[in-house]
Amino acid sequence: MINKLVIENLKHRWVRTVLSATAVGVQVTMILTLVGVSYGTLDDLSRRSRGAGADILIRPPGSSIISLSTAPMPEKILDFVRSMPHVAVATGTIVQPIGGTNSVTGIDLESFEKMSGGFRFLSGGPFRNPEDVIIDEYWARQFRLSVGSPMHFMDRTWRVSGIVEPGKLARIFLPLKLVQELSANTGKLTMVYVKLDDPRHLADAMAALKNQLPTYQIYSIEEFVSQISVNNLPQLKTFIYVVIGVAVVVGFLVVFLSMYTAVLERTREIGILKSLGATPALILGILIRETIVLSLIGSVFGILFTYGTRWAIMRFVPGSLNQIIVPEWWPVASLVALVGSLLGALYPGWIAAKQDPIEALSYE
Amino acid sequence: MSDALIEIRGLKKTYRMGDIDVHALRGVDLTVERGEFIAVCGPSGSGKSTLFYILGGLTQATGGQVLIDGRDLTRMNDSQRTAIRRELVGFVFQRYNLLPTLSAADNIAMARYIAGSSKFRSKQDTEWFRQTLELLGVAHRLHHKPRSLSGGEQQRVAIARAIVNHPVLLLADEPTGNLDTENSETVLKLLVDLNERLGQTILMITHNPEAAAYAHRIVNMRDGRIV
Ligand SMILES: Nc1ncnc2c1ncn2[C@@H]1O[C@H](COP(=O)(O)OP(=O)(O)OP(=O)(O)O)[C@@H](O)[C@H]1O
Ligand SMILES: [Mg+2]
């Protein structure tokens, strides 16, 4: 019976219901999109790291695993690595930041292709002229670039020579030598990628490398990828918590307003229920159920909205961001919405429960 | 003591509005026998509604004694008075006061729900209620929402809602105040019928002498007293 009243009330003021649920939905989307983008972008980073085709990564001494810091190591290390047992291919890269979180990766095209299985060009082809740059499809889509388009970074104008399928290490590639020169790092590398003749020799090869290069950071690709996680990005984690906090406050305010007006508007109806002998708990229960329904509808809206944000991100900024749908977070975001909403319903519910029935019934 | 249903002795009610005290009831004495149908008349502001609100447990008296069925309302706390509303009285108001979002049937069902399903769920009770709806002439209109019912129909649904839990006392505050002559007559005849057939005790506030004439007895109020 109470459920019927709750549903009828929500239907009766359906515009308010839809608006409130949408607002709750936006809050749910806020959380889910942030989480989805965090996971998606890191996921994409892992996928691209794997896409290089390497089994082992070597970084210079004292570097941190995720940072793109350019503390370099000498190029001649490559020859040494290549001479180690089980090493099939070794290639070096240098990464140069170009503003924001973007960077350009210098590669030795020949050995890089050998390791990664080769670029798949969607249009254009490899470097031919000194100003040529290779980009991936996401970057091209985000900045509306095609073969022959100019790009500006590192104080130069470049020309897109080829657009490749995404998933191979980076999004912007230049010849290694060029990046080394332009960044005053001639003969230096930031990362060495090693492919083995057979992955079964991983442990042996790792041990040998560690033995020979004790000060260097040596990871298997799986070790490396496992470090790419939200848990290793404390700032990102904090940011997610901040957004959750904001979401609770927004949900609180939306539902507070919505329920508060509902209570004022329904003064007479609450009086009627009281005249029929409804207890304060029953009145409060009605509002709480309404709130729960609102926040459930809102959560469904919010989950659907994330498919919209994912589409928009893939359509407009796939080069910078990646969003995946993270269903494990659906209950979390819904719960956050519910908590905010219930907090918001508390005061209006209390007002309703203690409302004087005769004032409600005797005045217009 | 007789087996009077209601015994009111020296009943006082003072509303506080900011710094001013409004003396709505200044010592009311009244005895109502079981099965009586009483009309309460009097000028506006004489305290008629206030008397009803106290009898119906909607508000607390300031002084005096009110016994309904042997229980003293003036000594009750909020939750005991809530129980009185649920179990002992039924209200009918001038403005019908149906819940606008529910159908007529659900309005009645809500009263039953609030009263609790433990009471009266027998076959006879269901049959009794069916006949009552028939008698009230609203049986075929039950699935409508209040706004698509006429005033007369709404008031008859409100009466059905008020008696569905078999209250010992039916309190009707100007039940015909918003109705035309014809509908007023229908509603008044229904009240008489309920009174005669079911022995329903009824207190009815009215400004209209013709309406008051349907009652067994007329009680006049003035300035918070019965005169
Ligand atoms: N909630 C309230 N707060 C303050 N004063 C009130 C309140 N309700 C009623 N009063 C005052 O108490 C007095 C009696 O009011 P009551 O409503 O009982 O009169 P009434 O006889 O029902 O009048 P009417 O015929 O106009 O309905 C009036 O002076 C009124 O202004
Ligand atoms: Mg009145």
Image (tube, coloured by chain):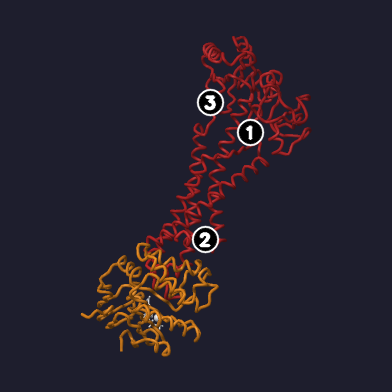
Chain colours: A red, B orange
- Of the numbered discs in the image, which one, if any, rests on residue A64? 3
Q: Hey, what amino acid is under mark 3? A: Ser
- Of the numbered discs in the image, which one, if any, rests on residue A102? 1
Left or right of A108 on screen, residue A328: left
- Do the residues at pointers 3 and 2 share their chain? yes
- Do the residues at pointers 2 and 1 share their chain? yes
Task: State which tag comes first along the sequence, 2 or 1.
Answer: 2
Q: CA distance from mark 3 to mark 2?
A: 55 Å
Task: State which tag comes first along the sequence, 3 or 1.
Answer: 3
> Along the line of sight, which residue is nearer the eye, A271 or A161?
A271
Is disc 2 placed on a helix, strand or loop?
helix
Image location of residue A219, percent across then percent down = 54, 20
Q: Are circles 3 and 2 on residues that touch, CB within 8 Å?
A: no
- Badge 1 density bin: few <14, some 14–19, many ≥20, Cα 10 Å: some
> Along the line of sight, which residue is nearer the eye, B82 or A361?
B82
- Residue placed furthest toward the left: B1
Q: Hey, what amino acid is under mark 1? A: Asn
- Of the numbered discs in the image, which one, if any, rests on residue A10? 2
Question: Count the marks: how many?
Answer: 3
Q: CA distance from mark 2 to mark 1?
A: 48 Å
- Which quadrant of the figure has residue B18? bottom left
- Which quadrant of the figure has residue A146? top right
Is disc 1 placed on a helix, strand or loop?
loop
Mark 3 sits near ligand 1, with its Cβ under 8 Å away: no
